[in-house]
Each structure stands twice: as C-alpha cells, then as structure tokens.
Image (cartoon, rainbow, N blue to C red):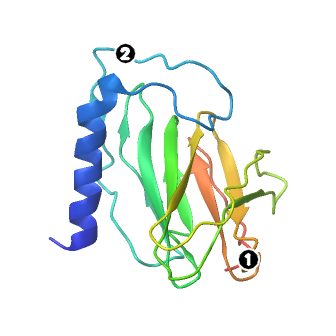
C-alpha cells in the first residue's frame, strides 16, 4: 500500500471515528446547522482512488449526514487533484507541500460556477487552509500568487460536472 493510499484510508477512519463529536466547521457557506442522523452509515465509492495526476478528478468517500474531510495538496505550484468531486457536506483542506507560499482565492471561470467568497491568505510549507461546502455546485479557485493560468482548481460538490477546461489546464 503506498503512502498516499494509507493516508487517505487513515483520514477516512479518523473522520468516521469523530463524526459523532464534530460540530459545524468554520467557513460554512450557508451557516445551516448539521442535521446528523445517529443511524447514518458510511458509504464509499468503490471507484475512488488516490492520485498524484493534477488533471484527474478524484472522488472522496462520504459519511451520511456529517461533513467529511477531503484534501487538496499544493505541490509543484499545482493543486492536486485539479478537480475534486465530493458529496456535501464536506470540508476541503488545502495543504501546502511546497517550500514557498500559496493561497486559495474563490473564482468563477465559467457561467456554471457557484458564487462563493473565500480567500485563505498566504500560508507556507506544511500549513493549510480549509472551507466547508454544504451546497451542491462547481466551486472554482486559484492561487493569487501564481495566477489562474498556472495554478487553479475546482471542487465539484454533489451531482455536478464541469466539462469545460480550467484556465490552468
């Protein structure tokens, strides 16, 4: 088992273990309270795989009723995965693996993009920023330091798709 797959499985296990203790996270886009079902069970997509290819869409397993956590790495001045497909509610954490600063700024490259207002501020190697998405939509973003043509991405929340190219593809 490679390191990334091990970390992905460990993260899912951690989320499942603390799901009953989790409250609403900071940065929720609608501020609505969590409506956790105490009988909820974990559901996973059997086709979900970890990837280091920034052009691949990655699907994250979900826990019914509780925000799951998904990670996007900032490595080599690219968001990996470039497109992250998740079910709501989900907290996305962007982790900087580069030895220089990055940030995450909301954008709308396409008419189908959902409006959201987010800016993480600059953060260095090993630091992270996060945002909780509660509503379905295509949420596009970029790094203001490196620009839309070099470093951009999208979080696809719910049953949505993005057939168009991103500026950095």
Residue 35 vertical position relative to residue 73 in the rendered view, above or below = above
Q: Which mark is residue 37?
A: 2
Gap between marks 2 and 1 measured at Cα: 41 Å
Q: Secondary structure at mark 1?
A: loop
Which residue sits at x=50%, y=80%?
A: 98
163 sits left or right of 83 in the view: right
Residue found farthest to the right: 111
Task: Let me know if residue 87 appears in the view.
Answer: no
Q: Residue 35 location in percent, x, y? A: 47, 16
| Figure quadrant of the C terminus | bottom right
Residue 22 vertical position relative to residue 148 in the rendered view, above or below = above
Task: Let me know if residue 56 appears in the view.
Answer: yes
| Figure quadrant of the N terminus | bottom left
Q: Residue 154 location in percent, x, y? A: 63, 60
Residue 125 vertical position relative to residue 27 in the rendered view, above or below = below
Q: Which residue is mark 1?
A: 145
Q: Residues within 10 Å of mark 2 (few under 14, many from 20)?
A: few
- 104, 151: nearer the viewer: 104
Q: Residue 136 location in percent, x, y? A: 63, 38
Q: Residues within 10 Å of mark 1 (few under 14, many from 20)?
A: some
Q: Earlier in the sequence, mark 2 or mark 1?
A: 2
Which residue sits at x=59%, y=33%?
A: 134
Asked where in the image residue 151 lies, by quadrant, the reply is bottom right
130 sits left or right of 50 in the view: right
- 161, 152: nearer the viewer: 152
Which residue sits at x=58%, y=35%?
A: 26
97 sits left or right of 7 in the view: right
Q: Secondary structure at mark 2?
A: loop
């Amino acid at each position: 088992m490679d390191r990334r797959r091990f970390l992905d499985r460990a993260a899912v296990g951690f989320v499942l273990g603390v799901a009953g203790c989790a409250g609403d996270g900071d940065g929720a886009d609608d501020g609505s309270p969590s409506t956790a079902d105490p009988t909820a069970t974990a559901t996973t997509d059997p086709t979900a795989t970890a990837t280091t290819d920034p052009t691949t869409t990655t699907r994250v397993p979900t826990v019914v009723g509780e925000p799951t956590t998904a990670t996007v790495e900032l490595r080599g001045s690219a968001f990996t995965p470039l497109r992250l497909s998740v079910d709501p509610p989900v907290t996305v954490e962007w982790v900087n693996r580069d030895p220089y600063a990055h940030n995450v700024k909301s954008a709308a490259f396409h008419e189908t993009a959902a409006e959201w207002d987010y800016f993480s501020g600059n953060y260095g190697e090993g630091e992270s920023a996060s945002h909780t998405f509660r509503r379905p939509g295509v949420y596009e973003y970029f790094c203001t330091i490196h620009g839309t043509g070099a470093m951009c991405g999208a979080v696809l929340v719910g049953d949505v798709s993005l057939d168009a190219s991103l500026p950095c593809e």
